[in-house]
Image (cartoon, helix red, strand yellow):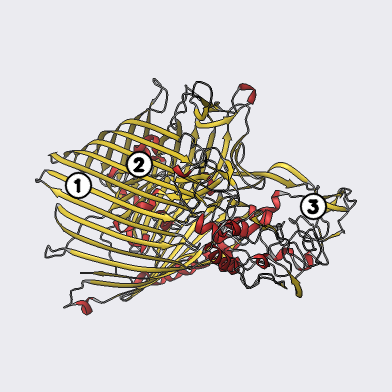
Amino acid sequence: MKKLTTTVLAVVLTSSFGLADAQVKKDSAKTTDIEGVVVTALGIKREKKSLGYASQEIKSDALSDGTTNTGNIAAQLSGKVAGLNVTTTSNFGGTSNLLIRGIKSLKGGNPLIVIDGSPVDNSSTYSSTYGSTYIDFGNALQDINQDDVESVNVLKGAAASALYGERGLNGVIVITTKSGRGKKDNSWGITWSSGVTVGSIDKKTFPKYQKEYGGGYMDSFYKYSPNVDGNNYANFTEDASFGPKFDANLLVYQWDSFDTTSSNFGKATPWVAAKNDPSKFFNSAITYNNSITLEKGTKGNSILFNYENFLSNGIMPNSDLKKNQFSLKVNYDFTDKLHSSFYTTLNIQNTKGRNTTQYNDNIMSSFRQWWQTNVDVLDLKRAYFNNAAIASEANNYGNVSWNIKSPTNFQPAYWNNPYFQLYESYTSDKRYRSFSYGNITYDVAENISITGKISYDRTNLLIENRLAKGTLPTDFGSSTNTVDSGYARQDITKTETNYDVLLNYKFDIANDINVSGVVGGSVRRNYYNSVYASTEGGLVVPGLYSLSNSQKSVLAPKEDLYTTQTNSGYATASFDFYKLFYLDGTWRIDQSSTLPKGDNTYNYPSVTGSLILSELLNVNWMNFWKLRANYAEVGGTADPYQTADYYNSAGIFSGDEGGVGIYSPITTKANEALKPQRSKEFEVGTEASLFNNRLTFDVAYYKTKTLDQIISMSVSPGNGVTSKVINAGRIDNSGLEVQLGLTPIKTRDFTWQMDANWSKNRNKVVELNEGSSNLLLRSFTGGVSLNARVGQAWGALVGSDFVYDANGNKVLETVTDEDGYTYVQYKADPNKVIGNATPDWIGGLRNTFSYKNFTLSFLIDVRQGGDIFSTDMYYGLDTGLYPETAGAARTTGWIAPGVLENGTVNTQYALGYPGMSGAAGGYEYMKVQKAYVYDGSYVKLREASISYSLPKKVLNGTFLTDAKFAIVGRNLWIIHKNLPYADPESVVGGGLYSYGWSIGSLPTTRDIGVSITVKF
């Protein structure tokens, strides 16, 4: 893979350089603005050439024009920024996880999102909806309307984010919103956009089923007891496809033979593979988005109003997302010296039918791991709708499953009818998100101004979970008792309020030497409140989802409440020497309410320098060349309630006096001596523009050391607790980032523009606390875990490996089972590092071709490395679903490659496939987890578009000023991957759930759409 991707990129780039060189003499373009102005920390505008640190700006057209509207700005950053790793799940309305310059904290972490200088929430909501069932509710950046975005500037390193102090550890993404721009005659400008996108599943990311064997674990049929008729019955209760070989002449009573609404009721049917496998379960995902913009503006005064309606149905039945977004931005000058700005946005979103993740109650886990290839999924659809219309206890309230317990007991053994589960036991959520800020600036003098600003970010989220009567009993609700029906709801409220006062200054120290900067302070207050409540013992009236419809008394709600505050002061000084050398310094002090009093104040410095070498060199072909270097410190504070012990309510103990409150014991010991974690970074880099800006590049090297991690570390239970909050651990990161812009061809009518980025990050866990060498981060179904292990890169996958001899051969041992059958199996070596979840490097390459009014562009997105443990393959091979488990694997058998313990090469045949339980031939395979770890590399055609803008001469004399038509696509082609039957990007969720685990994921969709944008 490495060789392949490197070679492909090398060939493309080499040919492009050759074309660029051939075109230089013909290019008459002149540079009018080499780098321009960008928005940095705190909303400060700077000339990019003066910056002593790496940043990368993405304009709105590069963000959205070349792709479909995903409804999530984070997803649309994929492959566009060097050093920014974007992982987008295939979950319906799910998370796009962002990571800048590798993992710096043992707990992971996402960059801070800032809109027009004000921080906003981008946390992921990943909730246990009931019992052990989890759903990904997405990251909060999806609440931002992409039509509001003017540009996105990624501040990558500590020096760029130092002004955010304790929040700058993981970098910052600065979003600048648009301001109103009216027509030249000062009338209103109106923009209307409309688009529709159709998504279909990429079959590379969904199982391919073997068609030779049917349901069961043995090659014999289920014998109905008492077995008086001698008929063959399908193995209803066995959720596997390791059963009898298909034979069209063989008649078998299958699950629908007992469905009274089926045409096969009472009949035996041919034993053949299903006509419609689970790939036919999915719908086409159709998305409609319509937006309108009203704007008007003159110097100092402008107004812009945006409205977008976004409607999308998922590929799962009975799933849809409806989103309405409103925004208003007003800039107004009261006088020549008094300026104001106001921005507000409201997102109203209703979502139904999000898919379950992880293992339990996950329909995708059934399709990928536990299924019978004789079951026709469209017959299940018919069975649900026919039986739901006459639902009663007799037909299990419409839940007629392929996985019934017996011909006389129609309750599910392990799996519900998937249509029943989606139409009856679905989750819904309602989300209200508002973000507003207002600021006012007074120009005290020509070189001094004062700004006051208030911002408010609020989210209200209501999650409702339904467990329909007739469902396979499962753990549910506050008590997690097993029930066959229920209702639960969770109400979450989050707010963040920021108060800022800034003094901006700029002075000339001497001719061609000046200093500018900011002195200011801020107060940040965060509030979080979550209330979870559920029915107990099931529902009284089926289908009525209300807490008052509980069979038993409802337990006290689970409540989580906190309020935090951070007080900050900061100052910057930027020196400009002859437009040749720039020297910047920043300092910030934070005081956090989540750390112990007396030890909760700390400061973060930074210093940067940049030298414009092109001012010293008189070279015609060099437009611009800069060297830069910096050093900075940033950090992170503690989460709430980590400095004092607290108890959780566990219900009421009834007694003669009316009951006594019960509280759960403390399992994690707090630490009243915590201190903030701190990250120190050094960075050097260079950037240049050559050959009349036909070639540009930016290269950065950085080295980061993060200390005093705030973690919960396991301790001996003999201490009365299982873990303790401590400051410990060190992670080192170093890396290289490269940005390249190239214009191989530029003529009057035709332009070819290439934009490439590449980055590599090396990560190492240097130490934990004394006596510990491993921190468990997550445990995966199938026995593998995600860890921070000393001496390894963060994200070590730990499980059993093969045992190898001195020559690297896998070693097998001979085993005799209880039935006297002798076979060989691989020896397993437990608790070994068997992979790492972090990629070796990431990159992107966009090509844009413009000919007159036509534009064609496409983006190749690449990830090299990053291992993935597949629970799907771990179980799916064991149950005989995949083609690897059929053919010779079940007939002539195979020879397990390796050597026996005595050193001789194994020659013993065994029926089965490495990973199957081997019931067909008695072969028992020791599940060595290393066998199910796959390289997570991929090469994707991430985006592609072709657009046409009507010529101005065609529009003259009409009410239109601009009109553009486009055909757009996203995730059109997975050019290369190594993970079987799944997308290596489609992980479980956000945060720590976005690393190293593939289980029950939805297939990725290929999205193709059309859009039209007109201005008048």
Residue located beneath label 3 in the image: 809
Q: Nearer the viewer, mark 2 or mark 3?
A: 3
- Along the viewing direction, whichever of 563 and 566 lies nearer the viewer: 563
Q: Secondary structure at mark 2?
A: strand
Q: Residues within 10 Å of mark 2 (few under 14, many from 20)?
A: many
Q: Are marks 2 and 3 in contact (CB under 8 Å)?
A: no
Residue 657 lies left or right of residue 754; in this view the side is: right
Residue 84 visible in the current orientation: no
Q: In the picture shown, does residue 715 fall above or below 744? A: above
Name the quadrant of the N terminus. bottom right
Q: Earlier in the sequence, mark 3 or mark 1?
A: 1
Name the residue beneath numbered marker 1: 341
Between disc 2 and disc 3, whose residue precedes? 2
Residue 807 x/y as whole percent: 80, 50
The answer to whether one can see residue 887 in this image is: yes
Which dot, 2 or 1, sits closer to the camera? 1
Tell me the residue that label 2 is attached to. 609
**Residue reaching furthest to the left:** 335
Spatial CA distance of label 3 from label 1 is 69 Å
Q: Amino acid at mark 1?
A: Ser
Residue 188 lies, in percent from the top left, at 16, 63
Left or right placement of residue 780 versus residue 575 in this view: right
Label 2 to label 3: alpha-carbon separation = 54 Å
Counting other residues with Cα less than 10 Å from the Cα at mark 1, is it few (<14), some (14-19), or many (20 or more)? Answer: many
**Residue placed most toward the observer, 460 or 401:** 401
